[in-house]
Amino acid sequence: MQVSVEKTSELSRKMTVSVPEEVFQEKLAARLKSLAREVKIDGFRPGKVPQHVIKKMYGDRVRGEIAGDLIQSTYYKALHEQDLRPAGHPHIHPLDEADGFKYTAEFEVYPEISLEGVEQIEVLRPVASVQDVDVNDMIEKLRDQKKSWVVVERPSQEHDRVTISFSGVAEGENFTDGKVENYQVVCGAKQMIPGFEDNLIGLNTGGNKTFELPFPEEYGNEKLAAKLAEFEVEVISVEEPVLPEIDDAFIKAYGIDGSLDGFREDIRSNLEGELEQALRGKLKTAVMNALYEKIQIAVPNTMVDQEVENMMKPYIETAKRQKMKLDDLKLPRDVFEEHAKRRVALGLILSEIIHKNDIKVDDNKVRSTIEDMAKSYERPEDVINWYYSDESRLNDVQQMVLENQAIDWLVTQAKVTDEAISFSEAMSKQG
């Protein structure tokens, strides 16, 4: 076997593999001889069919089979000889040769990754704590979740719930299928298009109002996007929110038997747990950003393509559930491509860090991670067993833990500066 490799771009390779004629003919003769013992042809006794007849009838098929076998057996051997690590599947092209068998394999290889300077990355580590005001805010949110509504005889205000009947017309066409009856809108909740709820403020029960508003340019319904619409609204009722008192019944509704102090401590403990996760997430993002900026690598297009497909899958699944035509689902590749490149690059860099520093997955951390995920379920043990009973599910958690261990290692190497932030900043999804 002869192997030559051509570098067609930074990561692309074209490998040509040649197999000597005698090897090919030897395999061909052996396969035809074996076939002669198996096939039944009219006019010949079993096992007595002449070779030239077998060759004439089955030669092309057998040549194709042998070519496939040779590609499969020589491809990985050739990669090993040339010390090549392909990223993704190759494109194989058999070549017509009068003497022997030859094919080319085109593929991309994994990039060479230098970790030089990785210990010099600079990271801002967010630091925050749960304050009394944060506990108070959470209690108010819990009260708001259990609020009741009381009808009032006054003009509607911000935060009131207004029950309306309304119709809408754009470019002379009614788009509400006549009139929408008894529709509830909370003023200021931003559940309607911008400006709609503002027009409901100051109206009394039984009042009517007609107003014009443009639909947003990015509105989900393309027929209405950026169109000017006229709405006719009739107010059925106006209700104001009434928050519950923080008494024993309110506290017990959240599964706590005890005093207000105990309730506050339980809330604080939960918030501290959420804060710890949020801070870790922000630190991980900061490390990843610094790492991506510091270590520049080329990424294989085949891996980016696969990542783009993975990122599109949830949108496609949603479209299928909603019985949308996939042709109507506009998912431009460039929306995902840059993020996909980043994911692939960081995955490769972290893999190299894990390999070079011999970081092994900590089984205890895997166990504690699964236990944390199971806490919110009614039967945590069942959830834990569910993960450990399936190798692929367990592997997903192991990979996540291993990645977090790599992040921990990077933090020990990096130049870390603590940055004090508020609880609300820590819990925000940005950064």
Image (cartoon, rainbow, N blue to C red):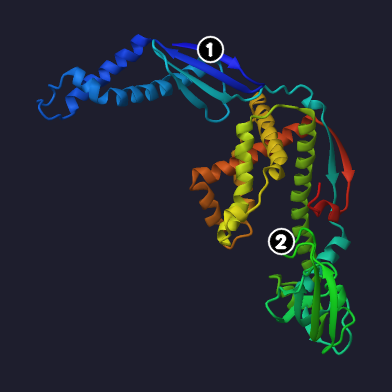
Q: Residue at x 51, y 19 (%)?
A: 79
Task: Decide if residue 97 is on the left or right side of residue 408.
Answer: left
Q: CA distance from mark 2 to mark 1?
A: 55 Å
Residue at the disc numbered 1: 4
- Pick whichever of labels 2 and 1 is earlier in the sequence: 1
Amino acid on which the number 1 mark rests in the picture: Ser
Depicted 356 relative to depicted 259: above or below? above
Residue 114: image location, x then y, percent: 72, 22
Depicted 9 relative to depicted 175: above or below? above
Residue at disc 2, secondary structure: loop
Task: Decide if residue 361 is on the left or right side of residue 49.
Answer: right
Nearer to me, 109 or 233: 233
The quarter holding residue 193 reads bottom right
Residue 170: image location, x then y, percent: 77, 71
Residue at the disc numbered 2: 222
Q: Are marks 2 and 1 in contact (CB under 8 Å)?
A: no
The quarter holding residue 112 reads top right
Nearer to me, 262 or 243: 243
Amino acid on which the number 2 mark rests in the picture: Glu
Residue 29: image location, x then y, percent: 26, 16
User: Residue 14 got which mark?
Assistant: none
Let me know if residue 176 appears in the view.
Answer: yes
User: For mark 1, does the 10 Å Cα neighbourhood hold few (<14), some (14 to 19), or many (20 or more) residues?
Assistant: few
